[in-house]
Each structure stands twice: as C-alpha cells, then as structure tokens.
Amino acid sequence: MSLRLTDAALDWALKHALTWSDTDIFPEIFEFQAISDDWPNIKKSIQNTDILDWRVRAFRRCLVPKHRFGFRISTQLDPLDFLVFTALIKEIGKKLEAVRVPAIQNIVHSYRFSPSADGTMFSKQYTYQSFQKSSQTICDNLNPSHVVIADIADFFLRLYTHRIDNALDSALGIGHMHAKALKDLIAHWAGSYSYGIPVGSAASRLIAEVTISDIDEMLLSEDAHYVRYSDDFRIFCTSEAEAYKYLTLVARSLLENHGLTLQQNKTKIVPVDVFKKVYLKENEKREIETLSERFYDLLFSMGITDLYGKINYETLSPEYKKAIDELNLENILREHIEEDEPDLSLLKFLLSRLGQIGDIDAIDLIFDNFNKFVPVIRETIEYLLKLDELKPEKKADLGESLINIYKDESSTASHLEYSRMYMLRPFSLDGEWNSNKQYIKLYNDALDDDFSRREILLAMGRSKKDFWFRSRKQYLHQMTPWIRRAFIYAASCLPTDEYKHWIRGVDSNLDDVERAIATWARKNPITVS
C-alpha cells in the first residue's frame, strides 16, 4: 500500500501557505513564492513520493515569548514538510471534524474545519468572539452562580504523541494510511520526546482539537454547561460545590488521559458577577472590544471592506481624520506600556491599527521602552514595516537604533533568538533601513544563531554585497538547509551571468526547493524585489 497526495489537496495547501503563511509566529518566508513559481515540478516530485516513506526535512525551533517572563518552544517546519502536513489534513479534515462536538451546538468554538477556496482552513463563524458571545448567552439563560475558568498548561507542547496516535486511529480507523503518515511526521518532529506537536500551524490546531475531544465528551456526559476555545474552558455552575466537582473532573481527566495539567495562575472558580466583569470585560474592562468596534465601524463608514489593509491617513477627509484621532490609539498605548503587566492583546491591537493608519508618533515610545515590547516583538516590527511614509534617512536612523539594541547585552531583547531575528527583519526586507557596514561582522558574530544569520544574509543580498557572496559561494554545501536557501536567494545580487554560471555548477547538489529558489531568484533578484 502507498499514499499519494491529490492535486486538489496539494494545490490547496500551497494556497493556504501563500495566503496565511505557514505560521502566525515566525516571519513569512520567501520559499513559498519560489515553490509557487515552480509548482508543477515541485508538486510532481511530492506526488512521486509515497508519503508513508516521506523523509522529514530540517525544521527550526526556538524560544518564543508568551508574556514578559514566560516562553514557549515553537517550531517552523521545512516548507515541503509543511505542505505535506497541510495537504494530509485537507484530505481527512472532514473526518476529524466529524468526531468533535458538532459546531452547531455552540460549545467548542475553536478551529472548526471549514476550508475555503482562498486557503482558509477554519470557519470564520466560530471564533474567540463567538466563544465570548456564547458565554454571555449562557449567563443570561442559565443564571449560574459560579463559573469554572480552566486553562491547560503548555497545551501543544505537552500533548503526548501516543494520545495523538490514539485520537487519529479513533477518528480515521486503525491502519488508515493518513493516520500513519501523520503519526510518523509528528514522531519525527517530537524527536526523542514522547510529547509535543508543532506550535503555530493550522494543521496542528485541528489535530490538537481532536486529541482532547474526549474531555468534551466527558463534560457532556456529566451534563455540564460549558464552552471551550482551544485550551480555555468555561463551565457554568449553580453552586461553588458543583463548580469544584467539574473542576476536579477536568483536572483528573486531563492528567490521567493526557498527562496534562491546568495552569495554576489561570485556573479558578469565580462568582458569576466577577466572571462578567473580568472575563466578559464589561464596563471599563471592555476597552479592546470597544476600540475594535469603533475602529471597524469607522472603516465601514469610509467604505473600506479590507479590515487589515493600509489606510492613507493624509487622503482622508477632515471628518475621518478627526474620528481616527479621537480613538487616541497612541495615548492608550502609552498608558498601557507603563503598567507592570501590560495587556498583550491590547498592545497587539494598538500596534496593528497604528501601523494600518501609518501613525509614526508611537516610534519614540517604542524605542524608549523597547524591552517592554519584547513579548509583542513580532507586532512591533510589523508596525515599523507598515510605515511607508518614513523617509530613507529616518529608516536608516531607526535601523541603527535596532542594531544597537540587538548588540546591547543589557537589553532583554538581545538575549532571545526570536527577538533578534525580528529586529533584523526590516533589513532583510528593505535596503533603506541600511546598516550594511555592520552586516558582515554581525553575520560572523552570530555563529550559533541561524535565525539571525538567515536575516543578515538576506540583508547583505539586498544591499548588494556581491563581493562577499563571491567569496563564500564555494562553501554552500557546508551550510544548514535554512541558511543554504537564504544564501541562494541572497546571492542573486551577483551579476546575472555570474549567478547563472554558479548555479549551473552546483545544480546537481541542489534539492527541489533550492533549485526552485535559484530559478525564481534569477527572475526576481533580491536587489530589485
């Protein structure tokens, strides 16, 4: 028996990657553009391989900040592994979804499988917002006295692989080829550990949901009134004693069946009035929801349907400028960053919206308090990258400031691979951030940090350091896969004929993706992209 992926599943997986990227944690990678450019050949190569014999390629993994002093390990899969993983889920997603609590019951609101043509994997109807609304509805209709708040500790990272295996077998049937393929992939990514599933990919989220669906079944069998969003449970009870009963049931089931525990600082039993005030964020606690509603209403009134697209503030009418100014986004950001424990969700929202309208006034605040922005470093850098109106000299000044923070050992941002990678991101995307005199030394100093080295390579290519690539191209075979691919793309800064000649000489040693990158880079050299 063999397993070959269909055209439809692979095409959809690539569309998913191009539309949504491979993860919401790591930077978007150029590899998918190159793969798309050579898709018929890449797809044929995948389809010629029995997925049951698929050899997992090199992934990368690092610590990612969850909050100021908390972290999680996150994994970015090799691009081909990601496409295979996603295509497998696309082919059997309906069967996985079928074993879950039906979505129509409005109990489980996270990651309901409903793929669309644009590459979206999950339903837009069931979200954290619907989770909140259902919580409110139960409060209104049931009139509970107490609510259990339960949050699973390190959910994705601590999922036992044998429990994942059992869940896949239960959903698909013992011996199902897709189950076998998925189990083999996950086992390889887990390595010597017996737990963990890659964090950040949509495919992982659906598998995690199926794996803990037995907890849903247990709660329903006990006539619990509850809602769940991923690892966040809310159980509505008529007394504190009943609440404690359900809490112990959840805790015991998670520990005995999954080896999982509840987060001590996030798990509690609260009176319903406290729940409404704190968790439904009524009154003053609804700041982020209120801001969101006001912002989206404003967009709709301007006839803007892309809720995340850029807004040219200068072209707006005085009326709309005034309405945006009255949101006081920058002042709210300033107030919250001064708190000991800022609301990270709010910070992300504010940074996204300030970038969307091209507001440059938050720049000084960010650089004066950079350490406080480390837990939201991705959104912070994305904010800076959205500021199209920045003049080259201003970008260069800010670039120098980023490099200084990157090198400053007294800065918390400098001690985390993930933060360093994002601080280097502007240089790899746009030559106007320009710190090119430092790139070579930075690359040499980042000996054990492939995350930084990859961004620096791209930055050197964009600043056309062809002499450096000329002196290093003979060492391509000594580089790790993620660095090799970046080097091949960045080296397109070499003169066209020289690059073509070099690629022709190493072609026999390139894999399918590297060959696709080289072909794509010749048409889209890094210096002009």
Image (spheres, rainbow, N blue to C red):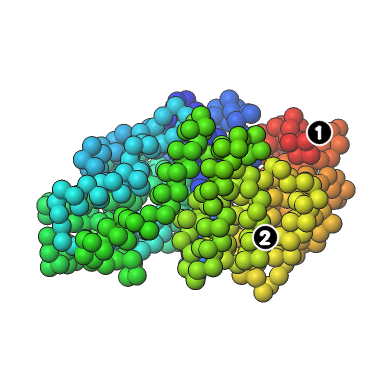
Across and down, in percent, residue 36 comes to 60, 30
Secondary structure state at the residue bearing disc 1: helix
Nearer-the-camera pick, 45 or 445: 445
Q: Residue 44's quadrant in the figure?
A: top right
Task: Give the side of residue 523 with respect to residue 497, left or right.
Answer: left
Residue placed at 41% from the left, 49% from the top? 290
Q: Quadrant of the N terminus?
A: top left
Look at 43% across and 52% down and name the residue there.
Answer: 288
Q: Which residue is mark 2?
A: 364
Is residue 8 visible in the rendered structure shown here?
yes
Question: Is residue 262 found left or right of 320 in the rendered image?
Answer: left
Direction bottom: furthest residue:
410
Instruction: Identify residue type, mark 2.
Output: Asp
> Could you tell me which secondary element the residue under label 2 belongs to?
helix
> CA gap, disc 1 to disc 2?
44 Å
Q: Which residue occupies the foreground of this view, 200 or 284?
A: 284
Residue at image mark 1: 500
Q: Residue at x 38, y 58 (%)?
A: 284
Viewer-proximal residue among 193 and 430: 430
Rate crowding at label 1 as few (under 14), some (14 to 19) or many (20 or more) other CA atoms within 10 Å: some
Judged left or right of residue 302, residue 219 is left
**Label 2 crowd (10 A; few <14 / some 14-19 / many >=20):** few
Q: In the rendered structure, which amino acid carries the disc numbered 1? A: Lys
Quarter occupied by the C terminus: top right
Residue 501 in sight? no
Q: Is residue 440 above or below residue 100?
A: below
